[in-house]
Amino acid sequence: MEFLVLICVLVALTAANTKQFKPLSDEQITYINSLSGANWKAGRNFYPHELERAKRLLGVNLTEVMEFSRKHLTYKNVQVRDDLPVNFDPRTKWTHCPSLIEIWDQSNCGSCWAFGAVEAITDRICIKGGGQVHISTEDVNDCCTYCGDGCDGGNPARVYLWYKSQGIVTGGQYGSNEGCKPYSLPHCDHHTTGKYPSCKGDAPTPACQLACRSGYNKTYTEDKRKAKSSYSIQSEEQIMQDLVDNGPVTAAFLVYEDFLSYKSGVYKHTAGGVLGGHAVKILGYGVENGEKYWLVANSWNEDWGDKGFFKILKGSNECLIEDYVVAGEPQL
Ligand SMILES: *[C@@H]1O[C@H](CO)[C@@H](O)[C@H](O)[C@H]1NC(C)=O
Ligand SMILES: *[C@@H]1O[C@H](CO)[C@@H](O)[C@H](O)[C@H]1NC(C)=O
């Protein structure tokens, strides 16, 4: 009897997961919001006709990240202490580091792999006492050919080795005129009714400039910041401990159709097929409505998701988010 009940439950769950909707359709969004157990809310971030454009934002080949990390990154065996907090938000711990509350915009370019790494690198320099500078996504995206193909995708794990061997210059957001090489591609509306111009066409990778913007008071070589170490981390608690001790880490995960429509709550895959691999910054964690989550910053500007952030189920390797975690320590 119990066995039959279990089979029915499994069949019902499988049916729910394979339910077919047009990606990004109103029907798919309504369906997600109708599920009482979903614990997250969907809404309109992208229109169905923007699916191809959205896919280009997903610039990570997860297989390549895994193969590379295993071969070239040291695995850090983090000692987990028993005073690990249940909730951890670094924005209230390291208030002298405003980069922790910032959300970036990769524009119409598949440079998520550069953002996911550079955002965490920036936070950690500040947390370790190096001051609040911004590390340049432009430098990584345009010049690290070892890391990938710029706007056509790359590998965040490689960024950490490049950071250690070559260093990365500083550079703020688009239009900030801050640092050596600020981001050159404009913020754009990935979404419906935001405040930026709409994202049109695919941005080509800007040419690599081995020089700082005019008026900047250091040379490109002088401005390079380097890592003391770069490493990969595994397991829920070790990732938590490293976040608490050292600050944000870089992660990559599988993006399914429904993720694009995320608005709030603790995301888990609920509807739709796989679209690609994406890199992001994990900054904290906690528990909401009885579900453990990772707190994550996306790079699709603050109009996407929960003011640019999202929460994703923690502890069960949701969308493989716990498989590709990498980080580094700055040389100050
Ligand atoms: C991803 O990387 C793997 C390993 O390097 C490679 O074999 C595969 O072709 C790549 N996939 C795509 C879609 O480029
Ligand atoms: C360069 O400019 C920054 C910020 O304006 C200033 O803090 C720094 O002292 C300057 N460095 C040099 C070498 O002039």
Image (spheres, grey):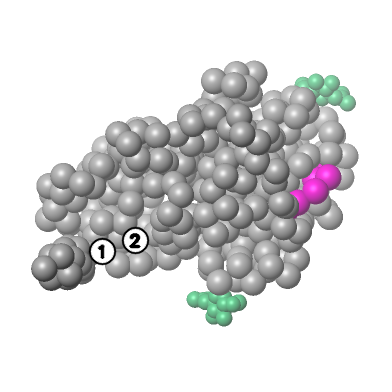
| Secondary structure at numbered mark 1 | loop
Q: Residue furthest front?
A: 1
What x and y, as percent, mark residue 204? 54, 60
Which residue is more in the foreground, 90 or 162? 90
Q: Secondary structure at mark 2?
A: strand
Dividing the image into 4 quarters, which one contains the C terminus? Answer: top right
User: Pointers 2 and 1 in contact (CB under 8 A)?
Assistant: yes
N-terminal of the pair, mark 2 or mark 1, is 2
Amino acid type of the residue tagged 2 in the rendering:
Tyr
The amino acid at mark 1 is Gly
Instruction: In the rendered view, tell whether residue 97 sits above or below residue 261.
Output: above
The reply to whether the magenta stretch includes residue 226 is yes
Q: Which residue is mark 2?
A: 256
User: Quarter containing ligand 2?
Assistant: top right
Relative image position of residue 60 (x, y in whole percent): 53, 63
Q: Kindly tell me whether mark 1's CB lies below 8 Å from ligand 1.
A: no
Q: Which picture quadrant has residue 184?
A: top right
Q: Label 2 to label 1, Cα distance in Å?
A: 6 Å
Q: Which one is in front, 205 or 70?
A: 70
Q: Image point 88% across, 39% down: which residue?
A: 222
Q: Is residue 138 magenta?
A: no
For disc 2, the neighbor class at 10 Å (few under 14, some 14 to 19, many from 20) is: many
Is residue 144 visible from the viewing direction of this image?
Answer: no
Q: Is mark 2 within 8 Å of ligand 1?
A: no
The disc placed on residue 263 is none
Q: In the shown orientation, is residue 280 left or right of residue 150? A: left
> Residue drawn 61% across and 34% down?
82
Q: Which residue is mark 1?
A: 272
Residue span colored magenta: 224-231
